Image: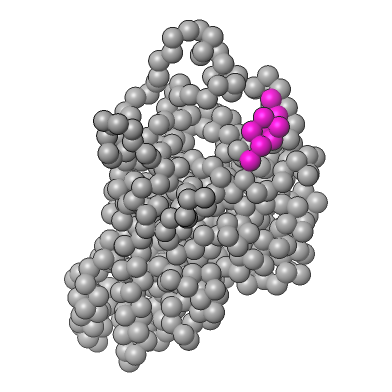
Amino acid sequence: MEKKKGIGTLCVQAGYKPGRGESRQIPIIQSTTFKYETSDQMGRLFDLEDSGYFYTRLQNPTDDLVAAKITALEGGFAGMLTSSGQAANWFACLNICQAGDHIVSTNNIYGGSFNLLGTSFRKLGIDVTFIHADSSEEEIRAALRPNTKLIFAEVLSNPSVEVLDIERYARVAHAFGVPLIVDNTFATPVNCRPIEFGADIVTHSTTKYMDGHGVAVGGAIVDSGNFPWSDWPERFPGLCTPDASYHGLVYTQAFGKGAFITKAVSQLMRDFGAQQGPQNAFYLNLGLQSLHVRMQRHCESAMQVARFLQGHPDVAWVRYPGLESDPYHALAQKYMPGGTCGVMCIGLKGGRDFDNRFMDALQLITIETHVADCYSCILHPASHTHRQLSDEQLREAGIDPGLMRLSIGLEDAADIIDDLDQALRAAH
Ligand SMILES: *Cc1c(COP(=O)(O)O)cnc(C)c1O
């Protein structure tokens, strides 16, 4: 058997092997549609009896090459790209759930995911119970209902950088008979491969570290192929009973381990059309090719910055799982021993006006809503994304009014530290 390749080799090469005289780099197939010789060939595609491209709303060759790379990085069976991280989580959940169903989710997930599940899914008739990410097995079990179809969580939460005990969640999910879907955006497969710890489906906002340069919004879904859908055919009718829109085809029977992704492409992409454009997939691949190098640098610099801030008299607290004092340090050591990511949360001692003077004085670090790319940036939820909430409402939502999310980019760590130092001085 061929020796298993390292993660860096996969970042550069996985998913695409050009033949003689073909382009070394993944080509951009900028075409909405694809040509066939006979009417029968086209007919067989629409019956899912042949595989082949026919319309980019469903599938595009450039997207598939990049999806194959992300699938290899995660150690999954099959994968697909989506137009955004929001679309990835939407499709991953809606591929299993319908009106009348129920989802259990951790409550520390990204704000957009919280709205997706808590607002839009509820409007679709899919109910959600939010639980604390540190819940015990009994507490997770207590949230499950007969109509629960999946458990959703973030591996490393945005923005609170809390580490999920993936194995605990996988144990409860599998004992009950539902898949564990995890969003692995912040750790990336370079630092954590959740499928190795029992996660069934992994999602990404590729907009963050995977792209890494702030150029292309995108998402990805990777299926491990491990979840035994057909053990519970009544629970997962969409996968285990005939699909009338494909002449009664049963996904689990026709596609085995590929059932989940085939259904998501042929049903959800067909009907909702949240495809990633091939040009964006090309940019995403450029990001992936240096992901392993960049993640290491993000983590090293973040560690230096976290230590600097921890020792600074104006800083009340620093939350970064790389710090030995962090409540999630032990879990981080287990699930992401090579490092977590470049994001940390900090609180200053001087109060709201001091916070604002500090942010205004930053010169290299920019104020922006984005995180997790090459530019160092900062966001203060109480003044920015969540400014309509009172301090009391913020605390109810689990957000310390003083919390600032600091994302360490790829600039020199010494320059980032100098900038923080001068801004803290200027805020006095
Ligand atoms: C940003 C983000 C999303 C949403 O992704 P978009 O690409 O912005 O749609 C989902 N999950 C996490 C953890 C994120 O950070």
Q: Residue furthest front?
A: 1
Q: In front here: 178 or 334? A: 334
> Which residue is pictured at 77% across the width and 59% down the height?
175
Residue 424 in the figure: left or right of residue 340? left
Q: Position of residue 415 (x, y in %)?
A: 19, 75
Q: Position of residue 60 (x, y in %)?
A: 41, 30
> Which residue is pictured at 46% across the width and 76% down the height?
321
Residue 53 in the figure: left or right of residue 244? left
Residue 350 highlighted magenta (yes or no): no
Q: Is residue 246 above or below residue 425?
A: above
The answer to whether residue 194 of the structure is visible from this angle is yes
Quadrant containing the C terminus in the rendered view: bottom left
Main secondary structure along the magenta-highlighted residues: helix
Q: In front here: 89 or 40? A: 40
The answer to whether residue 152 of the structure is visible from this angle is no
Q: Position of residue 251 (x, y in %)?
A: 67, 32
Q: Is residue 329 above or below residue 312?
A: above
Residue 310 in the figure: left or right of residue 51? left
Q: In front here: 132 or 357? A: 132
Q: Position of residue 201 (x, y in %)?
A: 58, 50
Q: Quadrant of residue 154?
A: bottom right
Q: Is residue 351 above or below residue 386?
A: below
| First to last magenta residue range | 249-257
